[in-house]
């Protein structure tokens, strides 16, 4: 035991969690732009992740020459901007989101056909695409039967945890 700084503290039992390590990992997430970090020490595996909450997108429209009441403007703003992509997605189908940070692949190999295309009917459990994370290929499966309305990511595109990948409709 030459370097005591890098040696792992001995745990009394395998189910005991090293809270100092968890706090250190959380500090690393706060100090960097990482969204998750995972550490393995023997049988113990600790994963710390944070959910990225997108800041509300503020959109401004030119105000009419005469405005009746300033309080009415915020309520009218969403209805006045139907082209807002977030509104369209929320109303037109179910998003299949990435369960991890990684790289999305739309086909099993470069020469293989894509798993899905817009308009395809899919069954619950069918592979929609693959997300590679830490050299592991993770199939992303359909949560239900439906029709692929839109594929929201490109092939070999980096994706974040919680990022919408595919839009399904009934």
Image: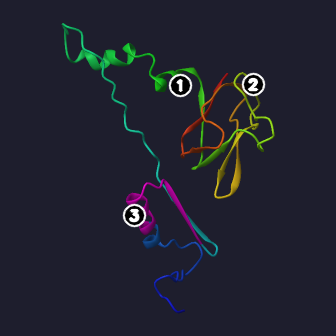
Residue 40 in picture, x, y percent from top left? 59, 70
First in sequence: mark 3 or mark 1? Answer: 3
**Would you say the residues marked 1 and 2 are in contact, meaning their CB atoms lie under 8 Å apart?**
no
Q: Is residue 168 above or below residue 107?
A: above
Question: Which residues make up the magenta segment?
Answer: 23-40
Report the residue marked by disc 1: 89
Report the residue marked by disc 3: 27
Q: Residue at left 80%, top 40%?
A: 111
Q: Is residue 159 above or below residue 79?
A: below
In three-dimensional space, the C-alpha distance between marks 3 and 1, rounded to whole angstroms, equals 34 Å
Residue 45 in picture, x, y percent from top left? 59, 67
**Left-right relation of 1 to 144:** left
Q: Residue at left 43%, top 54%?
A: 33
**Which quarter of the figure is the N terminus placed in?**
bottom right
Q: Is residue 80 above or below residue 1?
A: above
The part of the image, by quadrant, that contains residue 41 is bottom right
Q: SS for tag 2?
A: loop
The part of the image, by quadrant, that contains residue 42 is bottom right
In three-dimensional space, the C-alpha distance between marks 3 and 2, rounded to whole angstroms, equals 44 Å
First in sequence: mark 1 or mark 2? Answer: 1
**Left-right relation of 65 to 36:** left
**Left-right relation of 150 to 126:** left
């Amino acid at each position: 035991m030459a370097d005591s700084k890098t040696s792992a503290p001995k745990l009394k039992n395998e189910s005991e969690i090293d809270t100092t390590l968890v706090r250190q990992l959380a500090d690393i997430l706060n100090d960097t732009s990482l969204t998750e970090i995972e550490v393995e020490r023997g049988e113990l595996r600790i994963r710390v992740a944070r959910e990225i909450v997108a800041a509300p997108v503020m959109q401004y429209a030119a105000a009419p020459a005469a405005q009746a009441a300033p309080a009415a403007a915020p309520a009218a703003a969403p209805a006045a901007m139907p082209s807002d992509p977030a509104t369209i997605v929320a109303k037109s189908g179910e998003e299949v989101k990435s369960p991890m940070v990684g790289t999305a692949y739309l086909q099993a190999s470069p020469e293989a056909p894509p798993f899905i295309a817009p308009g395809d009917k899919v069954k619950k459990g069918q592979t929609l695409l693959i997300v590679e994370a830490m050299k592991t290929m993770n199939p992303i499966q359909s949560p239900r039967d439906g029709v692929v309305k839109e594929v929201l990511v490109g092939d070999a595109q980096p994706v974040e945890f919680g990022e919408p990948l595919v839009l399904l409709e009934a």
